[in-house]
Image: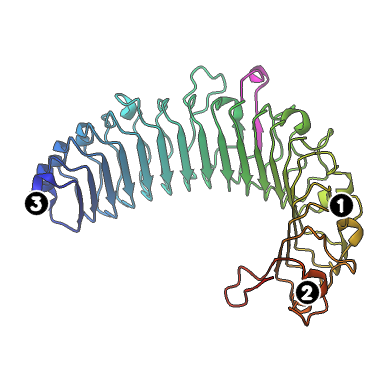
Amino acid sequence: MAPSIRELMLEECDDVMVRSAGSLTSLASLDISNVCKIPDELGQLHSLVELYVRFCPELKEIPPILHNLTSLKHLVIHQCESLASFPKRALPPMLERLRIVACPILKSLPEGMMQNNTTLQYLDIQYCDSLRSLPRDIDSLKTLSIYGCKKLELALQEDMTHNHYAFLTQLDIYESCDSLTSFPLAFFTKLENLDIENCGNLESLYIPDELHHVDLTSLQRLGIVDCPNLVSFPRGGLPTPNLRLLSIINCQKLKSLPQGIDALLTSLDYLHIYNCPEIDSFPEGGLPTNLSGLHIGNCNKLLACRMEWGLQTPPFLTMSGIEGCEKERFPEERFLPSTLTSLEIGGFPNLKSLDNKGLQHLSSLETLKISNCGKLKSFPKQGLPSSLSRLYIEGCPLLKKRCQRDKGKEWPNISHISCIVFDRFDAKNKEVILS
């Protein structure tokens, strides 16, 4: 019966037991943990599709027999604190996914590891503190995720004589690549999703003048988060006509959004800007006409000129979120467009009441979310829009008290709403009222 075993997990087994697994020729998935060595006998597992090597603090190397696993498609190496080297021979020829996590003394992946492999599409490297370089010839890669690798340097040649990332569609860089100060968007012509987070030395996204002709029509999602030294986007704007989501969060030095977002970002559907205190206006030309969702929070200079945003212009704007405004009354007349179906108001420390003049024309509004407005205690005397069907109130103790069913002073103004939820993220105090 043993040769027909398809999945096997070995934990804290002696060398004899691990070697014996090499005779299980039908094995498709092998999970090894807490072993000191990977024996050569495992190179006989020609049917193996998945290999997991985990929690092996004494494992110092991955043996060359890895190349013999001709059916292997998925390899995970996790928390091997003594792992110092990868085999210099090539990866298994059919390997598609490689994940390396928490190997703190691993310094590099050998240049020749891709020699016989043209199938690797997914590379995920996390918390390898000493890792400095990746192979330059991973041309087949479609997804690259880098987390917590501060010393890692990406191979980016300005002349683009050879583009090592020509087929990359997703790139995630989190708390990594301390040497990266400028990110060359033009290298990534097939990129669909780009997320850069917590890269403290990143100063700019740029496109060299000689590469402004490069096609960036694949990019659909761009997120820049916790990059405190970011100061600029490419000169002339982002030539990304199919970009659907742009999120810029916690970029304290950034003073302006990409130029020409109205003309260049013609497919932009959602724009999220949060805690970027130096941004003081939208670019000339205003908002993209295709925009359906806009969320602005804790951007004091930008919020100060909110009446100049031109929210009436995008004909499809249905969702808006505003956070961190100092006003006592909100919203102002003619600020919000009548197309809104969802409105979020949060973090208004001085807000005492909602203004009927700014709400009465919202005849399509279905969802209203109000959070962390500690002084807010009343709705407009004229009531909320009759179209409203969902009301969420979070962290507004005065308002919550006045909205109690049948006895609260504000109850007559909200009794027509079919679903009212108080403190939905507080399991102890959550309350739901359904009419």
**Contact, mark 1 vs mark 2 (Cβ under 8 Å):** no
Task: Name the residue beneath numbered marker 1.
Answer: 304
| Label 2 crowd (10 A; few <14 / some 14-19 / many >=20) | many
102 displayed left or right of 51: right
Task: Name the residue beneath numbered marker 2.
Answer: 399
Q: Is residue 305 visible?
A: no
* SS state under label 2: helix
Check the image and name the residue furthest to the bottom: 407
User: Which comes before the other along the chain, label 2 or label 3?
Assistant: 3
Question: Which residue type carries mark 3?
Answer: Val
**Residue at the spot 37% in from the left edge and 37% down from the top edge:** 108
Does residue 418 show up magenta in the picture?
no
Task: Name the residue beneath numbered marker 3.
Answer: 16
Magenta highlight range: 204-216
In front: label 1 or label 2 = 2
**Residue 41 place in picture, x, y as percent:** 12, 41
Question: Which residue type carries mark 2?
Answer: Leu
Determine the image quadrant of residue 397.
bottom right
Could you tell me how far apart the alpha carbons at marks 1 and 2 are, in whole angstroms? 26 Å
User: Which comes before the other along the chain, label 1 or label 2?
Assistant: 1
| Label 3 crowd (10 A; few <14 / some 14-19 / many >=20) | few
